[in-house]
Amino acid sequence: MNINRIRSELNRPVLVGISRKSFLERLMRRRASPEERLFASVSAEAIAVLMGADAVRTHNVGESRDAVRVAEALRLCLNKDPTRCNEELVRIVNSGNH
């Protein structure tokens, strides 16, 4: 999935809704209740954000918030010089915004 291509073709922000969906069972390669899909759900949401998604619809608000914040910080590093990436991550860590 190329989120940037979707965004440019639609000229709209991209919202993903992965939260505990049944397709995650197939990716997990096992039967799993919605509660057992939590880690797969949060992982997929973070990866979607890392790939460029603008927003996430979720039932796992606290868990997803933390994962998305980490993914957003790491997204700053994509295709950048490692030194610049390090500087930006240090700035985020030192800003103390919670």
Image (tube, helix red, strand yellow):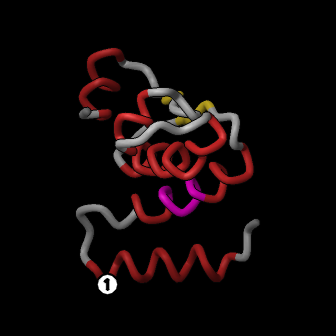
Instruction: Name the secondary structure under disc 1.
Output: helix
Q: Identify the residue at horizontal 63%, vertical 49% (top origin).
A: 64
Asked if residue 70 is among those painted magenta in the image, a careful observer would answer yes
On screen, residue 57 versus residue 61, left or right, reads left
- Magenta region's main secondary structure? helix
Q: Which quadrant of the figure has residue 3?
A: top left
Magenta span of residues? 67-72
Image x and y of residue 59, in percent: 70, 35
Q: Identify the residue at horizontal 64%, vertical 82% (top origin).
A: 94
The amino acid marked with disc number 1 is Thr
Q: Which quadrant of the figure has residue 55?
A: top right
Q: Residue furthest top?
A: 10
Image x and y of residue 53, in percent: 43, 38
**Residue designated by label 1:** 83
Q: Residue furthest front?
A: 31
Q: Identify the residue at horizontal 48%, vertical 51% (top origin).
A: 43
Residue 91 makes an appearance in the image: yes
Asked if residue 49 is among those painted magenta in the image, a careful observer would answer no
